[in-house]
Image (cartoon, grey):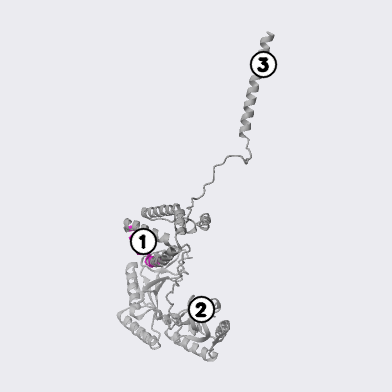
Amino acid sequence: MTLQTALIVAGIVLLLLVVAYNQWQIRKARRPRALQPDDDLPPMREPVVSPVVKPEVSAKLHEPLPEHQVERREPTLSASPLDAAAVAAGMAASSADADDALADEVAVAAAPSSAHAPNAAAGKPGHAEEAGESAGTAESHGAADHEEHADHADHGERTEQQKPKQEAAPAQAAQPEPVALDGQPTPAVIDPLIDCIVPLHLERKSSGDRILPLTGRLRRAGTKQVHIEGLRSEANAWEAVTAGHQYEDLQVAVQLANRGGALNALEFSEFVNAVEALAEALDASADLPDMTETVANGRELDAFAASCDVQLGVNVISDGAPWSAAYVQTVATQDGLVLSRDGTRFTRYQANAEGVQRALFTLQFGDTNFLRDDLTAKAGRQITLLLDVPSATQATKPFKTVCEYGYSLAQRMGAQLVDDNMRPLSESSFVAIFGQLQTLYDKLEARGMPAGSPVTLRLFSL
């Protein structure tokens, strides 16, 4: 038994030694080893250079080729599968060009210098033609997109035609010159009928970019509007100062009167101080008017405006129960009237001859504020339609429009139409009102300020 036990123990020890040796070999194989000089490495791949290529050309082959690199393309949102296919085709073509870049460079460098001259001369017109095509595409972008989506075959042909141009184009593509977008000039606003005008004589031309930052104080003088305009040499006309335009002279004007009253001495002094500061900043000379004469002109204009400032109203009176403000709001909204920003009135707009929407008349329901009041609790029996006579063009027959709308409201709401004295409007009263309106229109026309004209709208505003 002693020998048998000894053999068993020896076998177990031998087995353990074998296992331990195997584990040591595995850990040794996994341990990282520093790179030795005698290690075999695969040879680095060098570009194949023809024996006829000069050494400087061979050195140039190791430099990056910017003109043949694949151009980076920004992702774009495509509206149709055709655009995505076109982008993919363009990327594939660029990749193929990049693969052939090395061979093209060797061929160009190995060619004699005399061969470069014709190619370069031919490349310039091609580049100019390509720039011209780009400019033409920018001018008719919508038409080009339509044709591209309409004909896929034409798109493929254009792609093939562009590839030779890209290969022949010089490495540094010339940038197109920026085109200055000359915006439409703003119409002149200053009018000697209602403005005190101060000319500013510039020693040299000045740009709108320089003038505009200096006009911060030239917005209002008290309650009167201030305008500044420049004489543009290209148009030989006055226009509101605009960035990017050059001006030979300037003129600054303050309004002599508005519905807030006439220009007073304090407002005139504020205006003159602002004009003098602008003239000093621009090295200009200002022809300042006399304060006494200017203030007197403002008072005279204000008196004329007061004599013509007529607001004609007609009333719709309920024959039965009072109306709630919510009901009046519903009717006015359905008729297309627009609530004012302060919520006190609805306004009917009408397009003038130029297509601009102008206020024709307003609708008021007592002292109701349709934005703040409880419209279900607020009630009344009277709706007032108010016509601002100087602000409405005579050709549109505004009073007739107001009366027709008033009659329409009366029929729908169970009411009757009366004047400011609560008397029903009859045919004789209409004739008398039209006669008074004609006298007022003639008075404004004789002053050179027809009802509804821009200069009249400025005079009868705040």
163 lies left or right of 241: left
The quadrant of the image that shows the N terminus is top right
Tell how many labels.
3
Mark 3 Cα-neighbour bin, 10 Å: few <14, some 14–19, many ≥20: few
Name the main secondary structure of what is drawn in magenta: helix
Above or below: residue 462 compared with residue 121 = below
Above or below: residue 452 compared with residue 341 = below
SS at mark 2?
strand
Q: Position of residue 150 (x, y in %)?
A: 32, 58
Disc 2 or disc 1, which is closer to the eye?
A: 1
Q: Nearer the viewer, residue 202 or 261?
A: 202
- Asked if residue 138 lies in the magenta stretch, the reply is yes
Q: Earlier in the sequence, mark 1 or mark 3?
A: 3
SS at mark 3?
helix
Residue that numbered label 2 is attached to: 207
Q: Amino acid at mark 1?
A: Asp
Residue that numbered label 3 is attached to: 10
SS at mark 1?
helix
- Quadrant in which residue 147 is drawn: bottom left
Q: Which residues are magenta?
A: 134-149
Q: Position of residue 335 (x, y in %)?
A: 36, 67
Q: Which mark is residue 145?
A: 1
